[in-house]
Image (cartoon, rainbow, N blue to C red):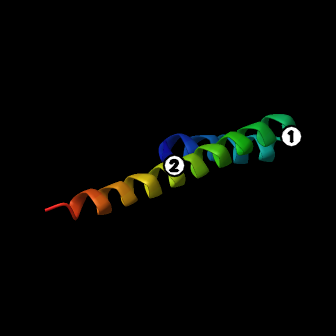
């Protein structure tokens, strides 16, 4: 998921440099959404791992 966020970020940078404002904005929005989704999933799995590891 983080890989896709990075890919859309690169697309946004290239589109912005070439002057495609709409495409750059859309790609940046998708990259931002995927990044925050990745962070949320990471935090949830981290907490589940910490709490599940303490059951001995």
Residue toward you, 34 or 51: 51
Task: Give the residue at the far front of this rendering.
Answer: 55
Which residue is under mark 2?
38
Specify whether 49 is left or right of 32.
Answer: left
Q: Residue at x 63, y 41 (%)?
A: 8
Q: Residue at x 30, y 57 (%)?
A: 49
Specify whether 4 is left or right of 13.
Answer: left
Which residue is under mark 1?
21
Task: Give the residue at the far left of this rendering.
Answer: 56
Q: Residue at x 46, y 58 (%)?
A: 43
Inter-mark Cα distance, 2 to 1: 25 Å
Pick the quarter of the image with the C terminus.
bottom left
Residue toward you, 20 or 55: 55
Residue toward you, 8 or 32: 32
Q: Earlier in the sequence, mark 2 or mark 1?
A: 1
Figure label count: 2
Q: Residue at x 68, y 39 (%)?
A: 30
Residue 32 percent location from the top left of the image = 67, 49
Residue 29 percent location from the top left of the image = 73, 43
Residue toward you, 36 or 17: 36
* Viewer-nearest of discs 2 and 1: 2
Rendered position, 26 above or below 51 = above
Label 2, secondary structure: give it. Answer: helix
Residue 5 percent location from the top left of the image = 57, 45
Q: Quadrant of residue 24?
A: top right
Residue 44 percent location from the top left of the image = 44, 53
């Amino acid at each position: 998921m983080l890989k896709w966020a990075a890919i859309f970020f690169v697309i946004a940078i290239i589109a912005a440099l070439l002057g495609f404002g709409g495409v750059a904005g859309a790609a940046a929005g998708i990259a931002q959404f995927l990044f925050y989704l990745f962070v949320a999933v990471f935090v949830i799995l981290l907490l589940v791992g910490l709490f599940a590891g303490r059951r001995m």
